[in-house]
Image (cartoon, grey):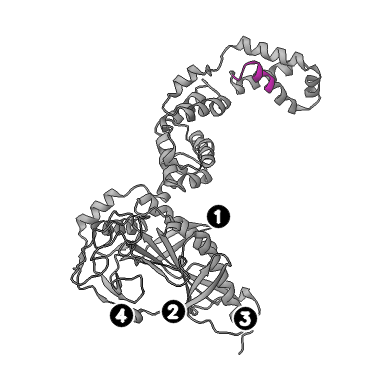
């Protein structure tokens, strides 16, 4: 029986991601060379990172600790007995002619990461493994029309390769996975997650198959994608390209591809390698690695609160909406600031509004982050408490007090309230007098109100606030205003 394929809807995509997470260590994986970013080319090198004869590697203990942290955060099985391997291949930017990595015995096995799509759907992306390895150097092809340049500063920098199972089905899912993984490594403080600087790099293995088919098709690997947007675009393009080939009856060749962010298209780099091509064998210069129970317990004790755990705390203990919790937990520095604010106030919702609204808007305008914000969290909490206590109102807090605090972040809120004379008046007779004056000024609008045009109450409130210079409680003023105008019927 011949199956006629005439629609892209006959197919489904199967995508697996390999994400290289560059660890935030001061030194490289197997020597004391600096692992810092941005130095002059070929400065962070030594006999070990260059692979010179007689140079021997020594494992950086921090990469083991960081790998264990990530594995615990992703609910992986931590392999307590593992070793390093040599992966042999020959590129100009790989000085030793091999890479120290892990093949048969990776440090972390299994695990999963929950993602949330724009539709609200949740999905657990299963992991295959996480293994430790060292990075290669960098080839630079755009500085000279005749020559390529080699910068070996990155050679030997520690990486964790996080490998998913082939269960991602779209570019959107891949992007959501990368967003969550980046958030997680930032919370763990093991990587800054800056894809543009190469701190996270993604390879995407993409294939298609007929819906209902359990066998995987020939896969193409798109290499070194350096932004979440590019990962999504590359996957969407490659799925479309492969479907078009199948619909034309053509075979999909198993290739390694490059993605051009300008054109949005992929192009072949070379035929896809297999594991045999790399001639893996155990690294003879490094001893087997044994993680003791005491070590695991020590790392577990160091684990910070994680994004999903914090999300549950914000929604369940503080009764914040899921949307608020998702926004706050999206950035570790934002979450840290919010948690510091709520140490000094119990109005969690108003604290969330201030962090997501006034503060975040100011930081965006200034192109700052929460790490750059100079106003102490307890002073923001003090503003919230003064609003709750009806010492000041929202309008004064936002337009006067917050502005003054931005200019003088070392000032105390209570001192600023006094200096700016912001304390609300609590004189009922004075407020009633303001209301009488306003209603007498607009008798025609009072008549309109009595004939159903309730919107004019806003005009009256504006006039009352002007007369009081904003120093009355708007809620109380609104209540008294309505009582007075109703009494004039």
Q: In which quarter of the image is residue 57?
A: bottom left
Left or right position of 269 against 39: right
> In front: mark 2 or mark 3?
2
Residue at image mark 3? 247
Residue at image mark 1? 120
Rendered location of residue 487, percent (x, y): 73, 15
Please, what secondary structure does the residue beneath circle 3 have? helix
Q: What is the CA distance from the residue labelled 3 to the residue labelled 1?
A: 32 Å
Residue at image mark 2? 272
> Which residue range is magenta in the image?
461-470
Front-lying residue, 121 or 184:
184
Q: Find out whether the residues at labels 3 and 1 contact each other: C-beta distance under 8 Å.
A: no
Q: Earlier in the sequence, mark 2 or mark 4?
A: 2
Q: What is the CA distance from the residue labelled 4 to the residue labelled 1?
A: 45 Å
Rendered location of residue 314, percent (x, y): 45, 42
Rendered location of residue 361, percent (x, y): 54, 39
Q: Check if residue 465 falls in the magenta segment.
A: yes
**Up-down relation of residue 130 to residue 352 (above or below):** below
> In front: mark 2 or mark 1?
2
**Up-down relation of residue 136 to residue 22 (above or below):** below
Q: Which of marks 4 and 1 is nearer the N terminus?
A: 1
> In front: mark 4 or mark 1?
4
Q: Which of marks 3 and 1 is nearer the N terminus?
A: 1
Spot the residue most to the bottom.
Answer: 1
Q: Which residue is drawn at 27% across and 74% down?
A: 86
Q: The C terminus lies in which quarter of the figure?
A: top right
Q: Earlier in the sequence, mark 2 or mark 3?
A: 3
């Amino acid at each position: 029986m011949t199956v006629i394929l005439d629609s892209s809807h006959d197919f489904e995509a199967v995508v697996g991601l390999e994400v290289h997470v560059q660890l935030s260590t001061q030194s490289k994986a197997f020597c004391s060379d600096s692992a810092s970013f941005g130095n002059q080319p070929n400065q962070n090198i030594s006999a070990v990172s260059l692979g010179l004869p007689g140079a021997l590697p020594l494992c950086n203990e921090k990469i083991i600790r960081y790998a264990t942290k990530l594995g615990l955060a992703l609910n992986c099985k931590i392999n307590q007995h593992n070793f390093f391997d040599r992966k042999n291949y020959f590129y100009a930017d790989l000085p030793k002619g091999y890479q120290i990595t892990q093949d048969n015995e990776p440090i972390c096995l299994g695990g999963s990461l929950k993602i949330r799509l724009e539709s609200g759907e949740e999905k657990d992306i299963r992991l295959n493994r996480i293994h430790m390895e060292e990075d290669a150097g960098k080839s630079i092809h755009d500085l000279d029309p005749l020559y390529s340049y080699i910068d070996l500063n990155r050679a030997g920098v520690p990486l964790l390769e996080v490998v998913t199972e082939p269960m991602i089905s779209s570019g959107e899912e891949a992007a959501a996975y990368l967003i969550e993984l980046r958030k997680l490594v930032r919370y763990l403080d093991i990587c800054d997650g800056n894809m543009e600087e190469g701190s996270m790099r993604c390879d995407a293995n993409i294939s298609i198959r007929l819906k209902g088919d359990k066998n995987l098709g020939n896969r193409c690997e798109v290499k070194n994608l350096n932004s979440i947007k590019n990962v999504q675009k590359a996957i969407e393009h490659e799925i479309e390209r492969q479907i078009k080939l199948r619909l034309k009856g053509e075979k999909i060749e198993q290739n390694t591809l490059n993605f051009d962010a300008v054109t949005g298209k992929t192009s072949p780099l070379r035929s896809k390698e297999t594991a045999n091509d790399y001639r893996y064998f155990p690294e003879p210069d490094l001893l087997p690695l044994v993680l003791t129970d005491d070590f695991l317990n020590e790392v577990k004790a160091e684990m910070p609160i994680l994004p999903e755990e914090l999300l549950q705390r914000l929604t369940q203990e503080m009764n914040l909406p899921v949307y608020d919790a998702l926004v706050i937990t999206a950035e570790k520095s934002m979450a840290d600031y919010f948690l510091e604010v709520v140490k000094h106030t119990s109005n969690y919702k108003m604290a969330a509004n201030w962090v997501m609204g006034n503060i975040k808007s100011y930081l965006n305008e200034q192109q700052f982050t929460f790490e750059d914000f100079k106003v102490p969290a307890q002073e923001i909490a003090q503003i919230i408490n003064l609003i709750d206590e009806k010492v000041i109102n929202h309008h004064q807090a936002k337009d006067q007090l917050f502005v003054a605090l931005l200019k003088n972040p070392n000032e105390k809120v209570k001192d600023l309230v006094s200096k700016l004379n912001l304390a609300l008046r609590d004189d009922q007779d004075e407020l009633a007098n303001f209301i009488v004056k306003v209603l007498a000024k607009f008798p025609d609008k009072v008549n309109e109100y009595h004939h159903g045009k309730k919107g004019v109450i806003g005009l009256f409130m504006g006039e009352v606030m002007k007369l009081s210079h904003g120093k009355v409680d708007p809620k109380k003023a609104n209540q008294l205003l309505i009582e007075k105008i109703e009494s004039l019927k």
